[in-house]
Structure formats: structure tokens, C-alpha cells
């Protein structure tokens, strides 16, 4: 299970949209692998939103860790009065973080590994709790 690299698009908007679509597919695959896909649609949507937000938050922290002082100052000035559009953010990160795409792929893969480890631990705990003594 991995986040696939898509061919480079001519449009920054399409590129960031492709990344969000790929992230959604990755999250769906994690839910299926963790046997959480067959819950109600409402519960599945709740899981998907929470996981998407967790990944985006993690990526935000990681991007800040990989920027130098000048890039951080530039980021702060650009976001002081308004939020940057996703395509604008992606372009900014690509311009300011060497190897940005690989760093993001590694971060998403790590999230997937942690999610599956936690899922396995929860499953084992649930099974032992339901086993008669």
C-alpha cells in the first residue's frame, strides 16, 4: 500500500487536487486493510475525515521542520492575513523544501504504518476483552 506518484500536471491546481485524491484513496485502502470499511457510511465518512485531517496536520508540521529561517519568514508573511490556496501551498513547499515530494510520501507511508500498528493493537485488545476467562 503506497501513495502513488502521478505524472506531473501542467496545472498546480490539478497537481494539488491529484494529491488530495491520492490521499483519499490511500486512506480508503487503510480502512479496508484494518477491516473498518464495512461500518456504516456515516461512521466510515467520520473515519475518513479524521484521518485526512490527521495526515494534513502531520504534513504541515513536517513541512515547517524542513524549511530554513528565510522560508519560514516568507511563509509567515504570506499567511499572516490570509490562508494560502492548496495549489499555492504545494508550489510554495516545492520551491522551498528540497525533495518535497519524497518527504511527503515518506510521511504518509509512516502514518499508514502507525495506523495499522494501532489498529492491530486495538483489535487484539478487543478480542481479549471479549474472550471469556
Image (cartoon, grey):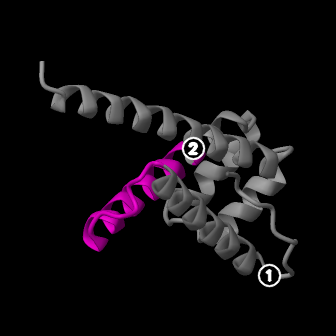
How far across and down, in percent of the image, does residue 83 sit?
Answer: 51, 65
Q: Decide if residue 61 is in sight here.
A: no
- Residue at the extreme left: 133
Q: Residue at x 80, y 81 (%)?
A: 11
Say the numbered circle drawn on residue 72: none
Quadrant in which residue 125 is drawn: top left
The crowding category of the residue bearing disc 1, from other C-alpha atoms within 10 Å (few below 14, some 14 to 19, many at least 20), is: few
First-in-chain label (1 vs 2): 1
Say the numbered circle drawn on residue 11: 1
- Residue at the extreme top: 133
> Quick check: 11 left or right of 124?
right
Tag nearer the camera, 1 or 2: 2
Q: Residue at x 74, y 54 (%)?
A: 93
Indicate yes or no whether the magenta region holds residue 35. Answer: yes
Looking at this view, is 72 or 18 the one in front? Answer: 18
Q: Secondary structure at mark 2?
A: helix
Say the numbered circle drawn on residue 112: 2
Q: CA distance from mark 1 to mark 2?
A: 28 Å
How far across and down, in percent of the image, does residue 24 sit?
Answer: 55, 66
Looking at this view, is 109 or 104 the one in front? Answer: 109
How far across and down, in percent of the image, does residue 53 sit?
Answer: 44, 55
Disc tally is 2
What quarter of the picture does the C terminus occupy?
top left
Q: Residue at x 71, y 62 (%)?
A: 90
Q: Is residue 16 above or below residue 29?
A: below
Indicate yes or no whether the magenta region holds residue 67. Answer: no
Q: Secondary structure at mark 1?
A: loop
> Quick check: 119 left or right of 9?
left
Q: Which residues are magenta?
A: 34-59
Amino acid at each position: 500500500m503506497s501513495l502513488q506518484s502521478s505524472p506531473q500536471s501542467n496545472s498546480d491546481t490539478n497537481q494539488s487536487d491529484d494529491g488530495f485524491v491520492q490521499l483519499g484513496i490511500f486512506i480508503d485502502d487503510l480502512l479496508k486493510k484494518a477491516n473498518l470499511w464495512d461500518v456504516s457510511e456515516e461512521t466510515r465518512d467520520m473515519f475518513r475525515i479524521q484521518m485526512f485531517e490527521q495526515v494534513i496536520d502531520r504534513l504541515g508540521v513536517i513541512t515547517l521542520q524542513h524549511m530554513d529561517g528565510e522560508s519560514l519568514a516568507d511563509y509567515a508573511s504570506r499567511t499572516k492575513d490570509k490562508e494560502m490556496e492548496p495549489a499555492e501551498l504545494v508550489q510554495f513547499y516545492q520551491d522551498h523544501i528540497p525533495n518535497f515530494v519524497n518527504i511527503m510520501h515518506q510521511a504518509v507511508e509512516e502514518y499508514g504504518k502507525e495506523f495499522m500498528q494501532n489498529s492491530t493493537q486495538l483489535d487484539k485488545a478487543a478480542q481479549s476483552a471479549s474472550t471469556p476467562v
